Amino acid sequence: MHEQIPPSNGVPELPPPLPAWPKVIGIISIVWGGLGLLCGGCGLLSPALTGMAMQGSGQELPPAMLPQGPQMVVIALSMLVAVVLIVAGATTVGRKPLGRTLHLVYALLSIPLTAISLWLSMKQQADLAQWASENPDNMFAQQMSNPGQKIGQMMGLVFGAAMGFGYPVFCLIWFGLVKKASDMGSGDAATDPYQPID
């Protein structure tokens, strides 16, 4: 008994549509990496700009506001990690498996850098508070004693932690646990379910 083959309507079977998430996440990563570069540049320039703003005021700049070696190193490394994220985003938009690997590298580098940066920021705030108590007549010290300034500093730390950990943790979960390279629709016929095999 022969198995009947259903008649063909002459319309070739189309492959499933490519997933949209690689382009969305890739663009977010490019934008996020660009913001990281911008913030890093501002971090490198802020001590110099603060010093220029206080020139001629007769006020002493707090030593903790001067460029510190560990902070500069962390900022420079964070800017390099931001470049990794931009490249990761671009390759993910192109649906290349390398994008997944680079996102995981970014996350694994960014999380400890964020933790170190937050620790250095808290140490800097403690040093500034100590300096302000020792120099009560300084204009900068008087501004720091304002309760609103202290609340702003605390909110800044919380916001920095949320921003610094949020996207790297998402990338670890998304690319490490949820998605595989073949889920991008990369065009590799051997592994890509979205690429028809001849």
Image (cartoon, rainbow, N blue to C red):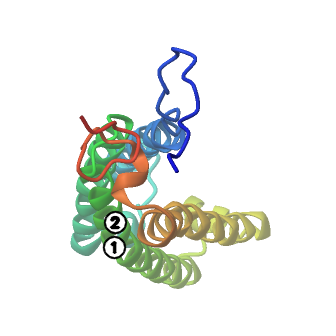
Q: Nearer the viewer, residue 192 or 162?
A: 192
Residue at the image point whose x is 58% and y is 59% from the top: 139
Q: How many numbered callouts?
A: 2
Residue at the image point whose x is 48% and y is 35% from the top: 18
Residue at the image point whose x is 52% and y is 84% from the top: 126
Question: Vertically, is 132 above or below 163?
Answer: below
Q: Which mark is residue 191?
A: none
Q: Residues within 10 Å of mark 1 (few under 14, many from 20)?
A: some
Q: Quadrant of residue 115?
A: bottom left
Q: Which mark is residue 108?
A: 1
- Can residue 55 be seen here? no
Is residue 97 shown left or right of residue 167?
left
Is residue 68 shown left or right of residue 130?
left
SS of the residue at dot 1? helix
Q: Quadrant of residue 53?
A: top left
- The disc labelled 1 sits on which kind of residue? Leu
SS of the residue at dot 2? helix
> Which residue in the protein does label 2 denote?
104
| Mark 1 vs mark 2, CA separation in Å | 6 Å
- Can residue 107 be seen here? yes
Residue 133 x %, y %: 58, 83
Q: Residues within 10 Å of mark 2 (few under 14, many from 20)?
A: many
Question: Vertically, is 16 above or below 7?
Answer: below
Question: Vertically, is 113 above or below 102?
Answer: below
Q: Nearer the viewer, residue 193 or 98?
A: 193
Q: Are marks 1 and 2 in contact (CB under 8 Å)?
A: yes
Residue 132 x %, y %: 55, 76
Q: Nearer the viewer, residue 183 or 133?
A: 183
Q: Quadrant of residue 76?
A: bottom left
